[in-house]
Image (tube, grey):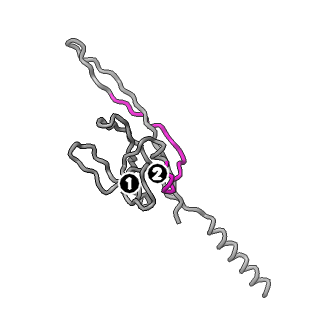
């Protein structure tokens, strides 16, 4: 009888300890969109995350930074100037590395990068004739994961 109870106790303990090491993840697909600030003549990036992940609130809550001349941006800070107490960060990042640092600081792990290739066509007028041509572009798509409890 003691042997059976010891055996049941060991199985219960081993099962409990195994379940503690089984990690769960949530996933997110992100594009880093490049834009240009004409006023300071410098490029910047915006994190564009696919919507629908309840664990990505900090990314979805990045504050838009408006470049209109009459707009006053208040209530946020740039990521490079943030402190621990700052709650709202602008979705205006100096480069792709800074964007990935923001994601990393929020416990997102980069698991893969794919090139998204798109093509289209345009037409250019030469003389009286219209000549179509194909345009091809590519941009990286970042696949991230985050451990959840």
Left or right, 20 with reference to 29: right
Could you tell me if the residues under marks 2 and 1 are in contact, i.e. CB atoms within 8 Å?
yes
- Secondary structure of residue under mark 2: helix
Q: Which residue is mark 1?
A: 89
Would residue 111 be counted in the magenta stretch? Answer: yes
* Up/down of 119 relative to 102, above or below: above
Residue at x-position 76% and y-position 82%? 6
- Give the residues drawn in magenta, as a range: 101-120
At 23% from the left edge and 14% from the top edge, which residue is drawn?
129
Q: Pick the residue in front: 112 or 102.
A: 102
Image quarter for residue 11? Answer: bottom right
Q: Position of residue 60 (x, y in %)?
A: 37, 55
Query: Few, some or many C-alpha atoms within 10 Å of disc 1 (few <14, some 14-19, many ≥20)?
Result: many
Q: Which of 105 and 112 lies nearest the eye of the viewer?
A: 105
Q: In this rendering, is residue 142 above or below 15?
A: above
Our reading of the magenta stretch's main secondary structure is strand
**Which residue occupies the extreme top position in the image?**
127
Residue drawn at point x = 53 percent, y = 44 percent: 112
Q: Name the residue carrying label 2.
A: 102
Q: Is residue 1 magenta?
A: no
**Crowding at mark 2 (Cα within 10 Å: few <14, some 14-19, many 20+):** some
Q: Is residue 141 above or below residue 8?
A: above
Q: Residue furthest bottom?
A: 1
Secondary structure beneath disc 1?
loop
Is 125 on the left or on the right of 100, as rendered? left
- Residue 30 vs residue 149: left or right? left
Q: Residue at x 24, y 17 (%)?
A: 125
């Amino acid at each position: 009888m003691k042997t059976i109870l010891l055996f049941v106790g060991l199985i219960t303990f081993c099962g409990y300890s195994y379940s503690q090491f089984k990690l769960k993840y949530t996933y997110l697909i992100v594009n880093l969109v490049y834009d240009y600030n004409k006023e300071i003549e410098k490029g910047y990036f915006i994190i564009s995350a696919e919507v629908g992940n309840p664990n990505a609130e900090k990314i979805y809550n990045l504050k838009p930074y408006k470049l209109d001349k009459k707009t006053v941006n208040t209530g946020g800070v740039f990521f490079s100037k943030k402190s621990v107490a700052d709650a709202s960060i602008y979705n205006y990042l100096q480069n792709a590395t800074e964007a990935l640092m923001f994601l990393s600081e929020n416990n997102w792990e980069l698991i893969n990068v794919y090139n998204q290739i798109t093509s289209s066509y345009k037409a250019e007028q030469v003389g009286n004739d219209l000549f179509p041509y194909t345009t091809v572009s590519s941009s990286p798509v970042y696949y991230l994961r985050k451990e959840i409890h």
